């Protein structure tokens, strides 16, 4: 007897309940991917970034979200929940299963956790950029660095004593990278 995984649609995924409170899930190319719930260090970095990005967003008429679902693809169905995200222009989630936002955020932020594989992290970067993200930040609390990825394929490493910028996407946003980890 062979077992084949069934690819889920957005509606199928929206109808699932999260059976394990110690894990969070995303839908990646029709398959549910469950990851351990992040720890305290991750949460502190996430709050620091959400406050800084949320303040910038309010001042510029944009929206900042934390762990919200973004439909990056309908076929195969992919819903990612960046740790922090900024959307410059309002978008309605009306009619989208799960109440998720259709399309990538302008800035997607993923915070690396000890169990993250480099392959899974690269897949997230490509998913966001392929769906239209203008910047993807990969924040590494252990190394105290941020990799900034762009749609043109370039990436820049920002170290803790350097300035992290919103570039031409979040104009005027600048913070010392090390402040993200304090």
Image (cartoon, rainbow, N blue to C red):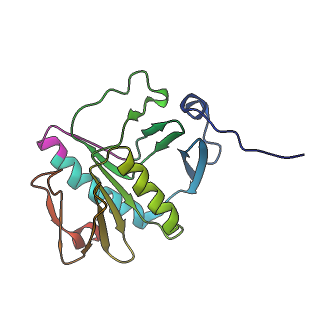
Residue at image coords 39%, 53% = 83
Q: Is residue 105 above or below residue 181?
A: above
Q: Is residue 116 above or below residue 49?
A: below
Residue 21 visible in the picture: no
Count of marks, rendered view = 0
Q: Can you see residue 41?
A: yes
In x, y percent, where is residue 7? Answer: 65, 39
Residue farthest toward the top in the current orientation of the protein: 95
Residue situated in front as seen by the camera: 93 or 123: 123
Q: Residue at x 56, y 28 (%)?
A: 11
Q: Residue at x 22, y 70 (%)?
A: 177
Residue 100 vs residue 47: left or right? right
Foreground residue, 74 or 35? 74
Q: Residue at coordinates 49% horizontally, 27% vertically from top-left?
A: 97
- Of residues 36 and 103, the one nearer the viewer is 103
Q: Establish if 146 lies above or below 81.
A: below
24 and 155: which is toward the camera: 155
Seen from this angle, which residue lies furthest right? 1
Where residue 19 sits, quadrant-wise, is top right
Query: Is 13 within the magenta?
Result: no
Q: Is residue 90 above or below residue 116?
A: above
Q: Position of residue 143 (x, y in %)?
A: 36, 78
Task: From the top left corner, tell me how far across and down residue 171 is, in percent.
Answer: 11, 52
The boundaries of the magenta stretch are 57-66
Say whether residue 95 is left or right of residue 160.
right
Residue farthest to the left? 172
Quadrant that contains the C terminus: bottom left
Instruction: Return the x and y of residue 176 as percentages of the image width and height.
Output: 17, 70
């Amino acid at each position: 007897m062979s077992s084949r995984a069934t690819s889920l649609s957005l509606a199928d995924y929206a109808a699932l309940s999260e059976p394990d409170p110690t894990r969070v899930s995303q839908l990646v190319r029709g398959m549910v991917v469950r990851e351990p719930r992040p720890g305290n260090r991750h949460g502190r970095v996430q709050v620091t970034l959400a406050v800084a990005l949320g303040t910038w967003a309010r001042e510029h008429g944009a929206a900042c979200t934390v762990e919200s679902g973004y439909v990056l693809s309908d076929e195969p169905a992919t819903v990612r929940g960046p740790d922090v995200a900024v959307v410059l222009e309002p978008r309605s989630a009306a009619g989208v299963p799960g109440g998720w936002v259709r399309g990538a955020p302008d800035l997607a932020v993923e915070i690396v956790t000890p169990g993250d594989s480099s392959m899974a992290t690269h897949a997230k970067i490509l998913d966001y950029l392929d769906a239209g993200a203008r910047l993807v930040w990969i924040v590494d609390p252990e190394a105290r660095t941020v990799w900034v990825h762009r749609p043109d394929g370039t990436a820049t490493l920002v170290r803790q004593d350097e300035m992290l910028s919103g570039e031409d996407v979040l104009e005027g946003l600048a913070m010392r990278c090390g402040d993200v980890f304090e």
